[in-house]
Image (cartoon, helix red, strand yellow):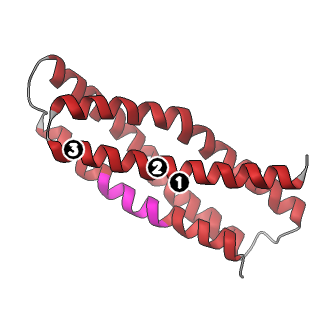
């Protein structure tokens, strides 16, 4: 494999991962602020779909392409590489429950919309947890970008 090609795909994948995560988080947060069950149900369906189509493949591709690049470039596994892996692990540890929460939130919103009922209190409890899990995940992924660009240590 060509180093430049893998590096380009790695950067594009990282950008897609970050952009999709930030974009879906913004739209879900914005939909929740409307308190409109129809809007929330529609957006929640799209957020779950975007996670499966874009986030999941990039979550898998990132460590694989990153490991290949580290090996091919001869970078040491300590320093910025190990720090990036730890931060990526933190983001992943936040993302897994977020996916579970999004699926439940989507289902609750769709059910509430179909039955023309308000969202249950559990939905809003999950929404708070979902939001707060996003904070460390966002900071971790943003930090990985800086480490990849700066490559110090």
Estimate the x, y position of residue 40 in percent, counting from the top left: 24, 35
Magenta region: which residues?
131-139
Main secondary structure of the magenta stretch: helix
Q: CA distance from mark 3 to mark 2?
A: 16 Å
Circles 1 and 2: CB atoms closer than 8 Å: yes
Does 18 sit above or below residue 107?
below
**Counting other residues with Cα less than 10 Å from the Cα at mark 3, is it few (<14), some (14-19), or many (20 or more)?**
some
Q: Which residue is mark 3?
A: 32
Location of the C terminus by quadrant is: bottom right
Estimate the x, y position of residue 102 in percent, counting from the top left: 35, 38
Residue 21 circle label: 2
User: In the figure, is residue 145 to the left or right of 40?
Assistant: right
**Counting other residues with Cα less than 10 Å from the Cα at mark 2, is it few (<14), some (14-19), or many (20 or more)?**
many
Q: CA distance from mark 1 to mark 3?
A: 21 Å
Which element type, helix, strand or loop, lies under badge 3?
helix
**Counting other residues with Cα less than 10 Å from the Cα at mark 1, is it few (<14), some (14-19), or many (20 or more)?**
some
User: In the figure, is residue 135 to the left or right of 118?
Assistant: right
Classify residue 118 by image quadrant: top left
User: In the figure, is residue 56 to the left or right of 109?
Assistant: right
* Residue 151 shown in magenta: no
* Residue 138 shown in magenta: yes
């Amino acid at each position: 494999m060509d180093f430049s090609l893998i590096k380009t795909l790695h950067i594009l994948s990282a950008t897609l991962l970050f952009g999709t995560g930030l974009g879906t988080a913004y739209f879900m947060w914005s939909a929740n602020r409307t308190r409109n069950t129809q809007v929330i149900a529609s957006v929640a369906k799209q957020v779950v779909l975007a996670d499966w189509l874009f986030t999941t493949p990039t979550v898998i591709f990132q460590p694989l392409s990153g490991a290949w690049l580290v090996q091919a470039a001869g970078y040491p596994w300590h320093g910025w590489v190990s720090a990036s892996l730890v931060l990526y692990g933190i983001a992943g540890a936040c993302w897994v429950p977020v996916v579970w929460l999004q699926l439940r939130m989507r289902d609750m919103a769709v059910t509430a919309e179909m039955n023309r009922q308000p969202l249950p209190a559990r939905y809003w409890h999950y929404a708070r947890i979902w939001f707060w899990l996003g904070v460390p995940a966002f900071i971790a992924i943003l930090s990985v970008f800086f480490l990849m660009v700066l490559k110090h240590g």
